[in-house]
Amino acid sequence: MKQVVQNYKSGELAVLDVPVPGCKPGGVLVRTAYSLISTGTELMKVSEAGMSMLGKARSRPDQVAKVMQSVATNGVPATYRKVMGKLDSYTPLGYSLCGVVEQVGAGIDDVKVGDLVACAGNEHALHAELNWVPKNLYTPVPDGLAPRHAAFGTVGSIAMQGVRQGEPQLGEVALVIGLGLIGQLVVQLLTAAGVRVVGADPDPTRCELAERLGAAACGDPASPAVEAAVAELTDGHGVDQVFLAAGGGSNQPVELAARLARDRGRVVDIGKCRLDLPWNAYYEKELDVRFSRSYGPGRYDPSYELEGRDYPIGYVRWTERRNLACFLDLVARDRVDVEPLVSHVADFDDAVETYQSLKDGDLKAVAVLFRYPEQAQEQGESAVPEVSVPEVRRTGTTVAPARSAKAPVRLAFVGAGNYATSMLLPHLARRDGVELSTVVTTTALSAANAQRKFGFAEATTDLDAVLGDKSIDAVFVVTRHSSHAELTRQALLAGKTVFVEKPLALTEDELAGVLAAVEESGNDRLQVGFNRRFAPLLQEARNRFGTRTGPASLRYLVNAGKLQHGSWYLQQGAEGSRFAGEGGHFIDTASWLLDADPVSVYATAAPGNEDLQVVLRYPDGSTATISYVTTGAAGFPKETLDLIADGKVLRLDDFVRASVYSDGTVGRKQWVSSRLPKARDKGQNAELAAFIKAVRTGGPMPVPLESLVATTSATLAVQAGLAGGAPVTLARAR
């Protein structure tokens, strides 16, 4: 079998072939599905191994003291040989994993072969294909909990033991200093316990992540923001507990803890940080300083860990095994969410490169998982997961109502928010042959405002009345994302032609529901608001580029920027991720330029924020890379695109300038848009014109339904790809 090891003398990291461990009594042999890299503890060990001998000695004064004692007892030569022999040996890495029981040792009756278990211990839950794990260091995984999430069990137990040491009470306020992996879990556990949390970390992306996961406020410990948040939440008294989850040589965490803790507050040390306690500050407040020892009671006790002797629950309520089981239960019941902490999933065979990237800073991560492909496939998590692209099925005759050429197209709007009133209705209100019949909103005033501004004949909050009105030709769905699929489904069943803003659906089930309505009603008269393919400048550039014969490479940079505080786009639990909401725009544009639907999607996310890299592969070998970033400069253009193929390059600069370059037989040829448009035209007006024409004539919709479905499926596959850390095949349903 293979195992990740390190030589502490040279710093060498390797994936070695080693013998399979035996299955001893009192434990189980586990084949690993996922193991978790502790980006704090393990990286510290990896970094120390790369130091000089003097550096190693300075970093581990406790070990130096042992060496000096050995010198006094055994002499210098014997001690030197002993120390060098120990340093020049391979040592294991890892202590948190999830896997499948492959063999059960004597005396074990709580699990069986094939059961999924989470395992702990720096001698038993290693980065290895197989591990022998004693009884008190594993626990069964609750039904429905993904193996990649169960692999967080050990670090979750560490965070849980730290929280228990703080003895939090409902309504209290806590400060978490250090928002790495352990700190992020402490934040969620405290929030689940009814405690309001302030976080402190110099990394703004980690602060943003902690706030998304429940913290009331976070900021740089050196800034006044943290102190101000504590003062506001505690009426100036100070926090009830401080949890030190930071590492490093700075004494700032313990000094900050003394300054922001209340009188007789509790300070809990979870991480390995400097602890030069300022005596006066701690004495005057009579602060209670506590240490949290790893996973909980039982840790470092051989009779508990190796011999399986449990502590009676009446005397020791929470042991390390019970902490492990409790944490997994919280994750399984969605009280703790570990998925946002997963910055990267690497194949186990790439372990050395992954550690090196972490050490060098090329990979900045909160949590990194190793995936063991063979076991992942056995557990139904294919190394190349699939997202099904539903087949569009139609029954009967497609609804295309006959109408007089002189009769106006009567439209109803469901929703009248910012996008509808700024990007759609101004174009429709002045278009000949269009009648704005009814606007439907959930609040009466917004409907009245839209009626007054754009001249709707009626304003109402009654959707059923609109869907039942046979005089209305088409319905625009311009509501929040979570309602798009259901409203579209209802409108199709009512026989309406539908224009729905992106996204069409946020889940595969929602998309299936829309297509079921198409099949049931025979009504496929649907358009999704993918307007960029209608932009005049991009259409001209595409015509200038001409046909191609070979595969193309497309690069699309979307400088999305930060959302304003309070934006409903931030409500990811209800409205989906930001990319799920608008990513279809960019996938549709790429597919239109490449004249095909994608066959696979690979997505990776920058740690701690919403920056994404999405790679789409097409049937002819073409690729499209979409960089969706929120951390760019606000003054840089939002969208830039390059299409490269057959010795030609198409360049689009934010829909204000386009150019095409080619090397022909007569020499270099170039086209550049002759003038800058007065304003960016992203195609909404042309898109609406094409939609109204289709409604009036009963002709084909501007974009085939199959294309809309393929784009939606590819957008959904991005989230699946982020979750699985591998390319996602877009399989056509059969």
Image (spheres, rainbow, N blue to C red):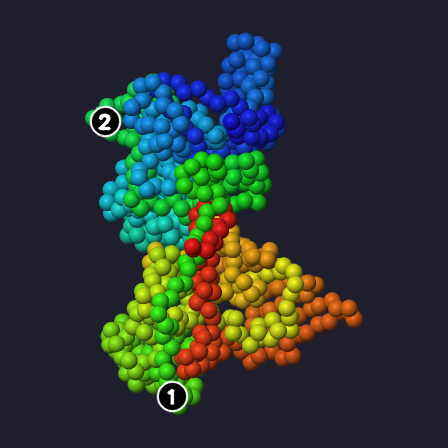
Q: Position of residue 660 (x, y in %)?
A: 66, 70
Q: Position of residue 629 (x, y in %)?
A: 51, 58
Tell me the amino acid under the disc marked 2.
Ile
* In the depicted structure, whether residue 159 falls above or below residue 702: above
Residue 210 vs residue 97, the one in the foreground = 97
Crowding at label 2, few (<14), some or many (≥20) Cα neighbours within 10 Å?
A: few
On residue 313, the disc is: 2
Task: Answer with mark 2 or mark 1, whichever residue precedes in sequence.
Answer: 2
Q: Position of residue 3 (x, y in %)?
A: 52, 28
Quadrant of the drawing holding the C terminus: bottom left
Residue position for label 1: 404
Residue 74 vs residue 146, the one in the foreground = 146
Residue 98 shown left or right of residue 629 in the figure: left
Kind of element beneath mark 2: loop
Tell me the amino acid under the disc marked 1.
Ser
Evaluate whether residue 579 shows in this view. no
